[in-house]
Image: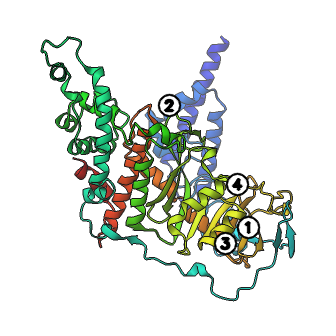
Amino acid sequence: MQRRSTSIDNKRRRFQAIDVLCAIIDEPSDDDDSDEGSETEDEVIQDIYSADEDTVSDAATDLSLATGASASTQNIGETEGQAEDSDTEPEGQAEDSDTEPEGQAEDSDTEPEGQAEDSDTEPEGQAEDSDTETEGENAIDLLQVLKVPVNLAGKNKYKWSGSVPLRTRIPQRNKVTGQPGNKGEARDISSGILAWSLFFTDDLLNDIVTHTNAEIVVQRHRYANDRQPDSDDDDDAEEEVRPSFTRNVDIVELKALLGLYYLAGVLNMNGVTTYELFDKDCGVAYFRATMPQKRFTFLTNCIRFDDKDTRQEKRERDRLAPIRELFDKIVNTSQQLYTPSEYCTVDEQLLAFRGRCPFKMYIPSKPDKYGIKIMMMCDSKNYYMCNAEVYTGKGSTPAGVSATEYYSVQMTTPIHGTNRNCTFDNWFTSINTARKLYDDHAVTMVGTMKKNKAEIPPSFVELCGREKNSTMFAFSGVLTLLSYCPPKPKKKIVMLLSTMHRQGDTTETVRLPDMVQLYNETKCGVDTFDQLCHRYSVSRHTRRWPLTVFYGLLNAVGINSMILLKGSHADDRSSIRKTYLPQDVG
């Protein structure tokens, strides 16, 4: 009985609500009575919400059936914040009304506090573009030049000065000699194959053919058939039973082999197995049309670059003896065909190799990590390889000369006496190297420096209490030492040494020191060259380190010849590499 009475009461409530709402709808909406109608609706809505959920849903359904109107036009069942289209919008939704409520009047003449982003008088905390906030941001970004004592000394008593030295004449660094660009035979080249032939001349290729044929004679016996010859002439019979792919090679076939190496690099298939390259279904038709798979594999195994009879004797003096002659010829040709710009970069390249090699290196910062380390100097502007030398271990440098000083001077040989600038990383940079390059070879330098060097004053590497984006300068003759604390979340000190800059940044109107800016602009010459080599690399998997170096030379010659071809034309052909290799390797 109690449930029935409750149900009857709920039905009565629903019918009463329907009657009241219908009466409101039928009433004329005069301006004077609008407030009274709103109060009646609020009372009915409050009464409906006092019932349980089933009652509310039933009332809404009955209301829709009784009036024949949809819920979107009635707005009776909408909660506060949903009546966007009603004539009398609830508080917080009257975006288009004449009198907008507080917090929604974004377009009104008098905008509320916290919303007036575009007003003339912006509230406190919202003026993102105000002059005060801009000054605060710039105060963080602008460079702070810290004062340095006049006299300083490093841990080994090396003397520095905090005052800028007086300049009495125009420095030699402004007198760069030699016009950058192609020179010699590289001035008038019209195709990629002509540029490539300047490096791999016929004489050089004939030397490779001679050494390769000598190895073919040795390797040929491994492929001889097991059946014994019937003829009395043992030599002729033995020649007849050998497979045809073990025949000697000539210069034409050698060029075809190198062309297939380049083609695999262009197609990004240098990591694909030989079987897949020559497969009839999934391989490349160019490979099968050039030579059989067995011939390709045989020539790759037999290719040699030195005289095997004198190799052991040369190895005692030079670890790079198996490919030294070819390597030096390619590097010398690179220097004869091109003059670098006023900025060069010295860094290291790592040729991926995991086989047996007496001078294999591990460099975790490089993509390949294990391999053969090559010291290299490249043009900082167009990344031409100007000089290179394979690092063959600690015993490769003269006695009494550190490896950093030796390779720094050795790599910059092509620009000695030209007053050009060279950028180094912290492995090459040292006080002795900087002075020797400037005094003896007329080459300026900029480079990062390890913080544990004994010549650096202790205050320059002290991190405690150091402000971010601040600099400290010290001078010693032609040397300028910079201690820079970048504006990064993790505070650290970066040391740079330069013989090109004679004074520090004396004003606080810059965001980055000139020395740091120049270093950032010129430090990527070798790294970019290495990236270009990796993009269309011809390197294939091998366990012979001389062949790995040879693949590296093929990559380097491909990049250098492309740069020479581009420099020999008056027009700027930015897409020259896209069409260079595919047209010429075939």
Determine which of the numbered discs, if any, sits on residue 499 in the image. Answer: 3
Residue 3: x, y in percent?
A: 64, 14
Residue lying farthest to the bottom in this orientation: 168
Residue extending furthest front? 232
Which callout, 2 or 4, points at the residue further toward the start of the chain? Answer: 2
Q: Secondary structure at mark 3?
A: loop
Which numbered disc, 1 or 4, marks the residue that appears first in the sequence? 4
- Which of pointers 1 and 3 indicates the residue nearer the eye? 3
Label 1 vs 3, first from the N-terminus: 1
Which amino acid, mark 4? Answer: Gly
Residue at 77% in and 80% down: 164
Mark 1 → mark 4, Cα distance in angstroms: 29 Å
Name the mark nearer the viewer: 3 or 2: 2
x and y, in percent, of residue 415 in the image: 52, 69
User: Residue 189: which quarter of the image?
Assistant: bottom left
The structure residue drawn at horizontal position 39% and vertical position 42%, both measured from the top left corner, is 306
Q: Pointer 2: what residue?
A: 355
Mark earlier in primary sequence (3, 4): 4
> Which residue in the protein does label 1 denote?
482
Label 4 sits on a secondary structure element that is loop
Foreground of the two, 288 or 338: 338
Q: Amino acid at mark 3?
A: Thr
Amino acid on which the number 1 mark rests in the picture: Leu
Label 1 secondary element: strand
- Report the disc number at residue 400: 4
* First-in-chain label (3 vs 2): 2
Q: Is residue 482 left or right of residue 26?
A: right
Above or below, comparing residue 197 to residue 310 in the picture: below
